[in-house]
């Protein structure tokens, strides 16, 4: 008995955590899956109803609007964050004396919550007293900036705040990648007469493929889950002009008593994340296997 | 003839240095402009929180306050006194968050360390698969577990309570803490453990005597990661609690949304700053570990 206990102790130690993960992650995801296949409204009902909720979801204009916003947001968010992150990391890589300080400054927004970020930017983008007033005070009397209350532009305010918060992180990832590159390669290229610009474009950036991959996956992950920032900045408004899938989901789940539909939307989000993360993890593991 | 050539070389050299100095300045200019871009919102937040509403209406985002007054900080922290239905202030919610963060971070870090240790130093059949099962929890969008979680909390009788939030954050932190410790312990040579085993040390003794003393870096990384994430959480807080049990981020959002009569931007900014201070302090004091957590916790197998 004692021997058995001794031998199986590692498994016994992991067991509670594993049981918790099994129940709260896998069990719950399956439950949500199943509920998306039922007629549940305010309370869960367990009679099977086929994929009707999913059909309802995809014929719901509000959901379509949310998905459209997510696509706009994601494309801009990923591209701008990558651009800023890469530029900053290359600039910082030029043996700058104040590098540590600057890095701290570029990255601190990551330590703030999206609610704090949203609150601050909501004030900055305030249509009358915010940035608009700043520019009129500076002499640009015709300057208007009403994106926060403009149905066509509200989604872009979320891009602005999200880029501010997350671009420093991309910088950190790329800087770490740049530091791991062998100096000799750069020196050799310099001797061959290559300009610094062409060294970065043709030699260094192509070597950063793995960093590109992980940055993109992380940014996609952040954007699909974006909820807090939308709530704090625009609350999905004006109207539903800056609605997103995560906001749609909680609205249906907690305010509209449509838990079947909410589950269907959650399943869509889950599958999207899965489609991004699984191939990435797979290639990442294979790369590690190849290296070791 | 020779002097002419020499002069030419000198000229080229001089223009090269001039070019280099120019690019150096350009570099610093760009870095400086970016720094301003990141700093500006924090500056606006602090400056606005120190102004009176009168000053806010007359000045603009960047203008400095006439005299520095902390009235809006007081209002944001402890209210205006007197019983006012719409008067939300942060103090009780700040404590809520603290009461939620401390146990959730401690429990999830402890179990993460144990799991990471068992997974790497006491290999058993299927341990890698088990780790992958844990890892999966880092990626799920929480929308996929919100509804069953909210029902479970109801059944357990801890919905809308701090203990409910502690449970939620502990459970969904486990994947990350296990990942951190697993990846740290896997790089520690097995010889150390083997030697201790030969000396007759058991599972727990090896952990506490051999591994724990060299684990401080990863403990710091994990604690900071968990602290920042739980302190900054809004989704769980707003889904599973309301009213008095809400954590600080939920309270901040409510405060900004529920304006009784006139919008007080100075109080909003003071509140936002108060809600952000704890994580900012951690970041300034332990930035290195914060970044390590970010890169390790982001997506790494």
Image (tube, rainbow, N blue to C red):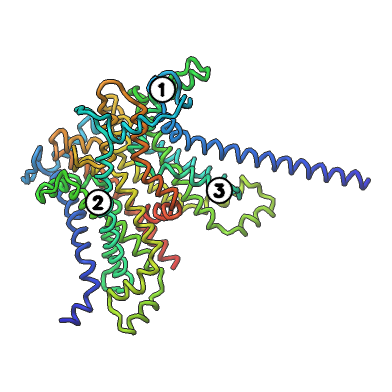
User: Could you tell me which quadrant the C terminus of chain B lies in?
Assistant: bottom left
Q: Nearer the viewer, residue B124 or A139?
A: A139
Q: In this view, does B68 lie above or below B54?
A: below
- As measured in the structure, the alpha-carbon distance from the residue carrying label 1 to the one carrying label 3 is 35 Å
What residue did someone put label 3 on?
A: A99
Q: Which of A150 and B101 is in front in this view?
A: B101
Regarding mark 2 in the picture, which secondary structure is present there?
Answer: helix
Farthest-out residue, front = B82
Regarding mark 1 in the picture, which secondary structure is present there?
Answer: helix
* Rendered location of residue A220, percent (x, y): 36, 44
Say which of marks 1 and 2 sits in front: 1
Q: Residue at x 20, y 47 (%)?
A: B162
Q: Nearer the viewer, residue A249 or B62?
A: B62
Q: Can residue A174 be seen in this view?
A: yes
Q: In this view, does B68 lie above or below B300?
A: above
Q: Residue at x 23, y 35 (%)?
A: A248
- As measured in the structure, the alpha-carbon distance from the residue carrying label 1 to the one carrying label 2 is 39 Å
What residue did someone put label 2 on?
A: B169
Q: Which residue is drawn at 40% across and 26% down?
A: A125
What residue did someone put label 1 on?
A: B56
């Amino acid at each position: 008995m004692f021997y058995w206990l001794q031998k199986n102790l590692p498994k016994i130690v992991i067991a509670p955590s594993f049981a918790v993960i099994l129940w709260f992650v896998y069990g719950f995801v399956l439950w949500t899956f199943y509920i998306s296949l039922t007629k549940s409204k305010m309370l869960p009902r367990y009679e099977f109803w086929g994929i009707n909720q999913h059909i309802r979801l995809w014929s719901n204009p509000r959901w379509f609007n949310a998905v459209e916003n997510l696509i706009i947001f994601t494309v801009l968010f990923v591209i701008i964050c990558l651009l800023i992150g890469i530029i900053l990391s290359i600039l910082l890589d030029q043996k700058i004396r104040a590098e540590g300080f600057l890095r701290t400054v570029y990255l601190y927004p990551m330590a703030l919550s999206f609610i704090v970020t949203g609150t601050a930017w909501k004030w900055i983008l305030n249509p009358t007293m915010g940035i608009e007033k700043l520019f009129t005070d500076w002499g640009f009397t015709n300057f208007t900036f009403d994106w926060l209350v403009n149905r066509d532009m509200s989604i872009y305010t979320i891009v602005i705040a999200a880029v501010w918060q997350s671009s420093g992180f991309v910088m950190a990832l790329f800087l770490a990648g740049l530091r791991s590159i062998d100096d000799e390669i750069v020196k050799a290229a310099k001797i061959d007469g290559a300009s610094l610009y062409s060294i970065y474009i043709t030699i260094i950036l192509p070597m950063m493929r793995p960093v590109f991959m992980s940055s993109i996956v992380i940014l996609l992950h952040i954007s699909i889950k974006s909820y807090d920032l939308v709530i704090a900045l625009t609350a999905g408004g004006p109207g539903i002009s800056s609605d997103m899938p995560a906001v749609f989901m909680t609205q249906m789940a907690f305010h509209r008593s449509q838990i079947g539909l909410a589950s269907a939307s959650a399943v869509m989000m889950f599958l999207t994340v899965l489609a991004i993360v699984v191939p990435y993890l797979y290639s990442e593991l294979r790369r590690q296997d190849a290296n070791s | 003839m020779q002097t002419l050539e020499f002069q030419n070389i000198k000229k080229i050299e001089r223009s090269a240095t001039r070019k280099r100095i120019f690019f150096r300045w350009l570099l610093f200019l760009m870095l400086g402009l970016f720094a301003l871009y990141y700093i500006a919102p924090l500056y606006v937040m602090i400056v606005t929180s120190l102004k009176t509403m009168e000053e806010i209406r007359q000045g603009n985002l960047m203008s400095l306050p006439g005299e520095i007054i902390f009235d809006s900080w007081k209002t944001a922290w402890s209210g205006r006194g007197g019983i006012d239905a719409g008067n939300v202030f942060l103090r009780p919610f700040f404590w809520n968050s603290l009461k939620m963060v401390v146990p959730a971070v401690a429990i999830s870090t402890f179990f993460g360390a144990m799991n990471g240790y068992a997974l790497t130093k006491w290999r058993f059949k299927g341990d890698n698969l088990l780790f992958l099962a844990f890892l999966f929890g880092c990626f799920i969008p929480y929308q996929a577990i919100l509804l069953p979680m909210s029902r479970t909390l109801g059944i357990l009788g801890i919905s809308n309570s701090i203990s409910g939030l502690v449970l939620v954050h502990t459970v969904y932190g486990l994947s990350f803490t296990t990942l951190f410790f697993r990846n740290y312990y896997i790089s520690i040579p097995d010889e150390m453990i083997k030697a201790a085993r030969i000396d007759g040390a058991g599972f727990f003794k090896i952990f506490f005597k051999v591994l724990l003393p060299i684990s401080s870096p990863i403990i710091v990384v994990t604690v900071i990661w968990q602290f920042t994430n739980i302190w900054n959480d809004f989704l769980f807080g707003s889904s599973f609690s309301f009213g008095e049990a809400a954590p600080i981020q939920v309270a901040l959002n409510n405060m900004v949304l529920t304006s009784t009569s006139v919008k007080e931007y100075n109080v909003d900014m003071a509140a936002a700053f108060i809600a952000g201070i704890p994580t900012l302090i951690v970041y300034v004091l332990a930035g290195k570990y914060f970044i390590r957590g970010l890169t390790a916790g982001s997506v790494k197998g």
